[in-house]
Structure formats: C-alpha cells, structure tokens
Amino acid sequence: MLRVTDLASGYQKIPIIMGVSFEVGDGEFVGVLGHNGMGKSTLLKTLVGQLPATAGRIGFAGSDITHAPTHQRARRGLRYVPQGRQIFPGLTVRDNLRMGAAGAGLADDVLDEVLDELPRLKPILGRAGGVLSGGEQQILALARCLCGRPRMVLLDEPTEGIQPSIIEEIIDILLRLKRRSGLTIVLVEQNQDFIRRLADRVLIIQKGRITGEVPPDHLADPALVAEFIGMAVT
Ligand SMILES: Nc1ncnc2c1ncn2[C@@H]1O[C@H](COP(=O)(O)OP(=O)(O)OP(=O)(O)O)[C@@H](O)[C@H]1O
C-alpha cells in the first residue's frame, strides 16, 4: 500500500531524512522506533505532504504521490494523527469529529460508526476539546482521523505525555481496529513496550535513516535491544 524509495527531506537547507526506503503492505501495522530527534515526525510530515520531499519517491495505493498536496493524499486515504494531537480546543468533541468527516467529504453518519469503535467519547460529545485530558484528546484525535475513513493512518507518538491507564486503553483500541477493520497503520514511537505490543514489524530510525528491522518480540529482551538497536530499555 505504501512504497517509500530513497526519500529525503528536511527544514530549509538542513537535511533530516536521508535516503529512507521501506514498504507497508495492506493491513499491516508497522512501527518505527527511534530516540528523540531522529526524524520520526519529519518522516511522517513528509509522507503526508506537510514537508516537501527533496529526493526520492512515495507511492501510495498504486499512485505516485511524492509531490501531491496534503489534501489530495488525505482524499486518497492517507491520514495523519500528529504529535500533540492538534484537535480544535474551542470546538466540542462532536464538532471535532464532524470536521474530520467534512474534511473527507463525508456525511455525519460516519460519526456513529466511529463512536461505536470508541464508545468512551459518547458521554463527552458536548464537551470542548480543550478541556479534555491528554489521553482523551489523543483518543479524540484518532477518532477524528477515523471519521475521514482512512485506508492508512500515520500515528505520531500517541503515548507522549499520556498516563499509563489510557495507554492501555489506546493499545486495546488499536488492536481492535487492526483486527476488525484491517486498517493499515504506521506508528512512530520511542515507547518500546507500546510498539512491541502493536506492531507486526519494527523499523529502527537513527539520524534520519532506517538502520534495521527487528521482530517486535526482540524489544522485550534488554540485551537484544542494546545490541541491535543501541537504545536504552524504557
Ligand atoms: N521546524 C523545524 N525547523 C528546523 N529543524 C527542525 C524542525 N522540526 C524538527 N527539526 C529538527 O529535525 C530533527 C528531527 O526532528 P523530528 O521532530 O523529526 O524528530 P523525532 O524523532 O520525531 O523526535 P521527537 O521524538 O522528539 O518528536 C531534530 O534535529 C529537530 O531539531
């Protein structure tokens, strides 16, 4: 579904992503693990078109989208849940979800489908997005993305600043989505346990390059993590 070849991008003249290549199959859940500042967010921003690719190619569902504008990528089904969520704080939960549907040209009926997947939002539909807890905002951001009926979701560090009980809830939600809807997901994270429990495959990103791939099980073994990934165990 996604084929990234020799992709490069960065900020002004500073190169950050340097020759990244990987593929994601239909229905796969791929994790990208890396420390702070290794280029995880920059990679996702380039995939969704918020940053231009300076070299390489992005193929999505059979089309070359390397230079397609963000809204066109979203219409094709490639959607992004950014780090920090970026929900609309002054809008209610329901209106945030409506924005997700409207952005994809869909009617409000899709809200019921999404709320059945994420029932935790039902009692707080009338609450302003800005007063929700960090975990609730993360779930709302995911729900808003799902209201656009994506084919592939790019998730940027969903556990950042979230309390452990809600992290468990997010794991359950994502496992359910994977099982029931066959959604294709790329998750970038530095939380090894989270990525291990969700991903089918884990790519390692270091200084803007994919430096390897590890089976998720290996992330439970501190010696393997240290040897193959060069990361401290979290
Ligand atoms: N808007 C920007 N302008 C210039 N440099 C930037 C900008 N955003 C990020 N960078 C730099 O690009 C590099 C990669 O940042 P990026 O946010 O992609 O890393 P990350 O792996 O997602 O890290 P984190 O886990 O901290 O979010 C860092 O050195 C960062 O300082």
Image (cartoon, grey):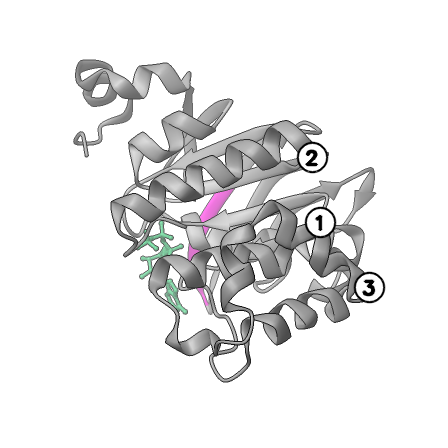
Q: Residue at 45% across / 66% down in the picture? A: 13
Chain-order first, disc 1 or disc 2 = 1
Is residue 138 inside the magenta stretch? no
**Residue placed under numbered mark 3 in the picture:** 106
For label 1, the SS is: loop
Location of residue 144 by image quarter: bottom right
Decide which of tag 2 and tag 3 comes sooner along the chain.
Answer: 3
Tell me the quadrant of the picture where the N terminus can be found. top right
Question: Picture coordinates of residue 74 (x, y %)?
Answer: 72, 58
The residue beneath circle 2 is 181
Give SS at disc 2: helix
**Number of other residues with Cα within 10 Å of mark 3, as a class: few under 14, some 14 to 19, many 20 or more:** some
Q: Which residues are magenta?
A: 13-19
Give the number of the disc on residue 150.
1
The reply, left or right, for residue 77 in relation to residue 51 is right
Residue depicted at x 62% and y 57% = 145
Q: Amino acid at mark 1?
A: Pro
Mark 2 burial class by Cα count in 10 Å: few <14, some 14-19, many 20+: few
Q: Which residue occupies the foreground of this view, 106 or 116?
A: 116
Q: Is residue 18 magenta?
A: yes
Please name the amino acid that badge 3 sits on.
Leu
Percent coordinates x, y for residue 78 in the rendering: 69, 50
